[in-house]
Image (spheres, helix red, strand yellow):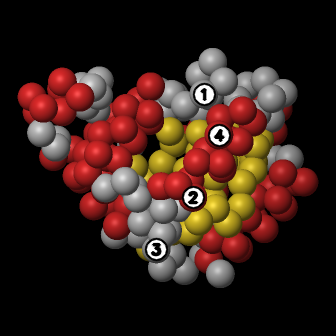
Amino acid sequence: MKIIGFAASSSSVSINKQLVTYAASQLKDCEIEILDLNDYELPLFSQDKEQQLGQPPLAQAFIDKIQSADGLLISFAEHNGSYTVAYKNLFDWASRINSKVYEDKALVLLSTSPGPGGAKSVLATAEGSMPFFGGTVKASLSVPSFYDNFDSEQGKLTNTELNAQLLSALELLQA
């Protein structure tokens, strides 16, 4: 089984990238690839830019990665209660090539933030919208207060209850 994971963030120190990388490391007997959204940086989407540029190769490359996977593991950063610009922009470009960006793939959606909210707002938005774009959400998990529940030096979730919930979610991805 091939799993593609990524953090919906362009931050070089993304806590969501730490979380998705840890989660992916817990999958057994899978081929794992972690994408970096910075490898798919595109101009801000607009119809004018689309007419000018056509379909950018990086947007197609992102869709090709999605198509190559059996399942997806995505951790959403939250900016002002919503998606990061980096994720939303890439998604907008990709959806113009294929409106079913997530190609009937099984998804486990994660989110985290430094605060107690755990980026639940953006996670709820993602859960609600994924089916419209071809994704099948198998499970989701918000990790609140990242620095209290995750050891960045060891790269692992230290909260045993949250870790058990994560492992249960990952089992659904592999089912």
Rendered-image quadrant of the C terminus = bottom right
Q: Quadrant of residue 92?
A: top left
Dot 4 and dot 1 residues touching (CB under 8 Å): yes
**Residue beneath disc 3:** 70
> In 3D space, how far apart are the residues under numbered discs 1 and 3 (Cα atoms)?
27 Å
The one nearer the camera, 39 or 103, is 103
In the image, which is nearer the foreground, mark 2 or mark 3?
2
Q: Specify which label sits upstream in the sequence, 3 or 4.
A: 3
In the image, which is nearer the foreground, mark 1 or mark 2?
2
Q: Is residue 127 visible?
A: yes
Q: Position of residue 97 (x, y in %)?
A: 26, 51
> In 3D space, how far apart are the residues under numbered discs 2 and 4 (Cα atoms)?
11 Å
69 left or right of 96?
A: right
Secondary structure beneath label 1: loop
**Residue beneath disc 1:** 82
The three-letter amino acid code for the residue at tag 2 is Pro
Q: Residue furthest right?
A: 161
Q: Specify which label sits upstream in the sequence, 1 or 2.
A: 1
The three-letter amino acid code for the residue at tag 1 is Ser
Q: Specify which label sits upstream in the sequence, 4 or 1.
A: 1
Q: Residues within 10 Å of mark 3 (few under 14, many from 20)?
A: some
Q: Which mark is residue 125?
A: 4
> In 3D space, how far apart are the residues under numbered discs 4 and 1 (Cα atoms)?
8 Å
Q: Specify which label sits upstream in the sequence, 2 or 3.
A: 3
20 left or right of 167?
A: left
- Residue drawn where x is 12% and y is 39% of the image: 54
> In 3D space, how far apart are the residues under numbered discs 1 and 2 (Cα atoms)?
18 Å
The three-letter amino acid code for the residue at tag 4 is Thr
Secondary structure beneath label 3: loop
